[in-house]
Amino acid sequence: MVVLVVGMPVAALGAGLTSYEASMRTVRTQAAQRHQVTARLTSDVKGGDWAKRAAPVRWTDGDGTVRTGTALVKPGMAEGATVRIWVTRHGTVTIAPTSTLNATTSGWLMGAMAAFGVAVGSHAARAGMSLVLDRRRYARWAAEWELVEPRWSARFRR
């Protein structure tokens, strides 16, 4: 019971905060390394379904360098349409940085998993101890019965 009352909150908070802090380091790193730019499509994007498609794009960096790359865009867009894309410091097209919501969700999920792990572990430990103690009790009972049974059943033979 002590493991559940003390261990579960400690494990949940420890795992949750550790996961959150690690995810927040990733968020800060990605936010520092990536930025959004406006790019123009260099060809039509075919398709009419909902899935984004890879399309060639062109944009101008802050220093005036014209760059090209491939980005995921909505289908059905025409050549010359503008899209917002994420790029690294080196001008490589990338995905959007991880958000603080992802870090928070990661922290809560890891905390919940740790709490669940402590609960399952303590239940398994209790069940294992109960099994061992029951086997010991049954062995003692069987040994005592071996001593008592002959005398007890003799009463009914008269």
Image: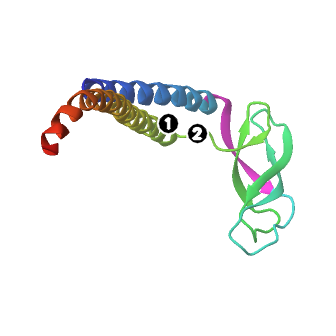
SS type, badge 2: loop
Q: Position of residue 132 (x, y in %)?
A: 36, 28
**Residues drawn in magenta:** 32-40
Q: Quadrant of the N terminus?
A: top left
Q: Which corner quadrant of the image does residue 34 belong to?
A: top right
Q: Which amino acid does label 2 sit on?
A: Thr
Q: Where is residue 11 in the image (x, y as percent from the top left)?
A: 38, 26
Q: Which amino acid does label 1 sit on?
A: Ala
Residue 151 vs residue 73, the one in the foreground: 151
Q: Name the residue under label 2.
A: 98
In screen coordinates, is 33 left or right of 80? left
Instruction: Identify the residue at horizontal 81%, vertical 37% (top origin).
Output: 64
Q: Name the residue under label 1.
A: 103
Dots 1, 2 in contact, CB < 8 A: yes
In screen coordinates, is 153 left or right of 132? left
Question: Magenta span has 10?
Answer: no
